[in-house]
């Protein structure tokens, strides 16, 4: 029998270990649950490293351990161990212990920038994990503005698009296409676009590629994120149509009105929201659109695992975790009209107009 088909565990499973050593059944269940969580954490790090290092890009077709060692600069022993771990995680597959390829499940990661998007999500998840652990301390979690630049960039990248990818362009076309008023406006001609709390502005930079008559301003307090956004804009060839401003989004002014304001509301604490919405209203022309991403999609229970963790961290930053219905009410209270909810496979948006 081929050695890659024989799997002898180094350690007992939690259940077998419990049986042999007389551990109470309840403790066995706990061990199983914690082991599963620990495994998921480590495999997430394994996958992210494989993506961000370019390791998986060399596995699109079947390749040998020797060739992987040569192109990655890693020792053959390390490469073999990485391949074994990635195979155990279902990422790689093999018919020969010295040759590996991406599994059928994970092969699409190399298409259209999917791998970049997934790596960004995993990077943000790693930062969130540390912040969630801090929720059990009196001073935690660290405020968004107090994070190290690399952590803040990882969080920002995980909630936006990677604008250099085909995946981002397709996703943005889907979002805009699902909002007729926005789609018609962008298709009609020259549009001025303002994003309050733009961060890395992945969606904004993606739209600038899709709509050549769009001009934009991005406003954010994080100079480090705007510096990265400027570099990306130049790389994409759209830097002549976007201007970045390091300023409080509640106070930014402009002599000309905008056709669209995008408000990244899930980074705005409760104390800033009334002023932010008042400024968004002031910056829009009459009839202009306000686009607001939702945190809790329609029909999602706050008790679901992913949503509960998002709510925990968001409210730890004193940012209200509003449902789309509550978000519509907030916009109406601020004077906007016609709050409507537009879900899509990528994101949920709430759309309103200035009267």
Image: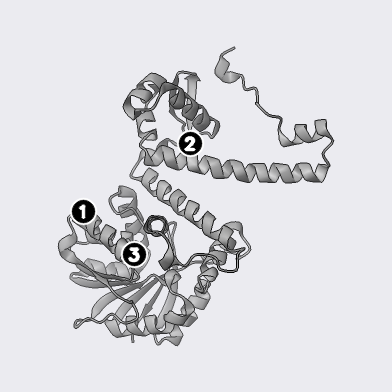
Is the C terminus in the top left, top right, bottom left or bottom right quadrant?
bottom left
Q: Is label 1 in a helix, a strand or a loop?
A: helix
CA distance for labels 3 and 1: 17 Å
Label at residue 105: 2
Q: Position of residue 166 (x, y in %)?
A: 30, 48
Q: Which x, y percent locates residue 276?
A: 38, 80
> Of tags 3 and 1, which is closer to the observer?
3
Residue that label 3 marks:
199
State which quadrant residue 256 falls in.
Answer: bottom left
Checking the image for residue 236, the label placed there is 1
**Mark with earlier residue (2, 3):** 2
Image quarter hosting the N terminus = top right
Q: Are marks 2 and 3 in contact (CB under 8 Å)?
A: no
Instruction: Farthest residue to the left: give it.
Output: 240
Secondary structure under tag 2 reads loop
Q: Which residue is rendered at x = 38% and y = 64% of the image? A: 178
Q: SS class of the residue under badge 3?
A: loop
Residue 330, x across and y down, in percent = 47, 81
């Amino acid at each position: 029998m081929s050695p890659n088909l024989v799997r002898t565990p180094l350690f007992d499973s939690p259940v077998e270990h419990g049986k042999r050593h007389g551990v109470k059944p309840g403790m066995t269940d706990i061990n199983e649950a914690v082991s599963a969580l620990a495994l998921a954490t480590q495999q997430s790090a394994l996958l992210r490293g494989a993506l961000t290092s370019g390791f998986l890009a060399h596995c699109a077709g079947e390749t040998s351990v020797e060739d992987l060692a040569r192109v990655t600069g890693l020792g053959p022993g390390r490469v073999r161990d990485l391949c074994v771990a990635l195979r155990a995680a279902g990422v790689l597959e093999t018919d020969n212990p010295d040759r590996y390829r991406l599994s059928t499940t994970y092969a699409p990661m190399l298409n259209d920038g999917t791998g970049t998007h997934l790596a960004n999500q995993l990077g943000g998840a790693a930062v969130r994990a540390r912040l969630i652990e801090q929720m059990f301390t009196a001073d935690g979690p660290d405020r968004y503005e107090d994070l190290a630049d690399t952590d803040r960039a990882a969080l920002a990248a995980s909630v936006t698009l990677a604008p250099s990818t085909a995946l981002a362009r397709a996703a943005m076309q889907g979002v805009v296409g699902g909002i007729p008023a926005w789609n018609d406006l962008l298709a009609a001609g020259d549009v001025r676009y303002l994003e309050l709390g733009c961060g890395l502005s992945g969606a904004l930079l993606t739209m600038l590629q899709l709509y050549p008559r769009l001009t934009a301003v991005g406003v954010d307090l994080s100079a480090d994120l705007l510096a990265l956004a400027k570099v990306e804009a130049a790389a994409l060839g759209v830097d002549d149509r976007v201007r970045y401003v390091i300023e409080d989004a509640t106070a930014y002014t402009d002599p000309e009105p905008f056709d669209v304001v995008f408000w990244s509301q899930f980074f705005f604490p409760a104390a800033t929201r009334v002023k932010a919405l008042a400024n968004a209203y002031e910056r829009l022309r009459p009839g202009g659109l306000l686009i607001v991403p939702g945190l809790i999609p329609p029909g999602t229970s706050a008790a679901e695992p992913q949503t509960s963790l998002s709510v925990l961290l968001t409210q730890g930053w004193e940012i209200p975790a509003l449902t789309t219905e509550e978000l519509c009410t907030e916009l109406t209270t601020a004077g906007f009209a016609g709050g409507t909810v537009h879900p899509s496979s990528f994101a949920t948006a709430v759309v309103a107009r200035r009267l």
